[in-house]
Image: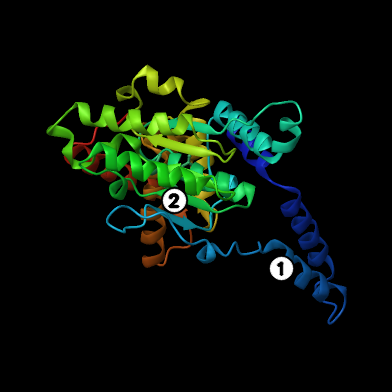
Amino acid sequence: MAASDKAETLWMDEESSLTDAVHSALHENRHQPGGLAGRLERAAATRGRRRPLNVNNMTPLPLSDEDVPLVTVSEPQVSMDDLVLGAQTVTALREVLNEQRNVSRLAAYGLRPRRKLLLAGPSGTGKTRTAEALAYALGIPLVRVRLSAVVSSYLGQTARHLERILEFCESGRWVVSFDEIDMFAGEREDSDHGEMRRVSTVLLQQLEEYAADNLVIATTNHGTSIDTAMWRRFDEVLAYRNPTQAQISSLLEMKLRRFSYKINRELVSRSLSGMSHAEVEAVCLDAMRKSVLAGAKSISTDDLVESAASRKKRYKEAGKSQG
Ligand SMILES: Nc1ncnc2c1ncn2[C@@H]1O[C@H](COP(=O)(O)OP(=O)(O)O)[C@@H](O)[C@H]1O
Ligand SMILES: [Mg+2]
């Protein structure tokens, strides 16, 4: 069993194992009409469903000076089970979740949970999805900061916007994500190289004063362009990387699970090497679409290897380097 497979099963909560138990019980006596099976089935269905978070009632949202909402609030939809990550990352995230679930126990000893995370690594490796999955695991909404609305040409205004956002963040229980903070300088990157640095300094100063225990998750696709002073301000910096061969293999299993497939996993994984998780997923989707439209019974090694090759070629032509 690959390390990441093991990691995945660790995310399973008691709820899903109970549901599994109910399902296997059902499987055995599903043909007895009107009996226990039916009742269990209904109970399992209700239990599996999560209570909606009513995110639409969480107004008023903080507004920019131009009356544009500075954040969006949504109910998270994906769980940690949908992510294939390195063992170290999984361990760190599990610890962070455990701390978030035990805020008052920590507080009794004058301790606080880790709450400011920076996820850094190439695009398509699951950083944005991690923020959502953490909110899902905690059963709270995800607040996404709209950086394009936050950054103004006046630094004072940007600071004011950030102040409003953090004040809002302190007013409830949620996970707050500052996605792709390297885009913070907006399109003005070429005009003034110092712009991003100044804006991120303001963000970090504001975060320093951030009083709540809520998780704040910043992500960046360009870890190297963030200076060490910035890294130090986070409680945890997690490096995201393109998947290893073993992780590609787990990804294949995860992404193709709804299909029947007969493949040489090692060969396919090798043909996908160097791709990000998102690219591996795209190759699987190519193969699934093709197989459906061709009326094929199952997905083959060739389907995936061919799709991998043609995607690699297209990425190369589009000037995208393969990690
Ligand atoms: N580690 C991963 N495990 C499983 N799927 C992934 C992973 N990383 C990316 N994906 C797939 O690619 C999509 C885009 O990933 P995303 O989290 O937006 O990447 P990033 O923010 O690192 O650029 C996800 O919605 C998911 O379908
Ligand atoms: Mg992202």
Residue 283's tag is none
Q: Quadrant of the N terminus?
A: top right
Percent x, y of residue 127: 44, 39
Circle 1 is placed at which residue position? 45
Q: Is residue 320 left or right of residue 126?
A: left
Q: Nearer the viewer, residue 68 or 276?
A: 68
Residue 165 screen position, x and y as percent: 43, 46
| Residue extending furthest toward the right | 35
| Picture quadrant of residue 5 | top right
Quadrant location of the C terminus? top left
Which of the labelled discs sits on residue 300, or is there none? 2
x and y, in percent, of residue 167 in the image: 48, 45
Query: Which residue appears farthest toward the left when viewing the image?
Result: 191
Q: Give the quarter of the image for residue 156.
A: top left
Question: What residue occupies the far bottom of the structure in this picture?
Answer: 34
Question: Which residue does the image show at 50% across and 43% down from the upper left?
Answer: 131
**Could you say which quadrant of the image residue 40 lies in?**
bottom right
Amino acid, disc 2: Ser
For the point 87% across and 73% down, the residue is 36
Q: Mark 1 belongs to which amino acid?
A: Ala
Left or right: residue 202 compared with residue 297: left
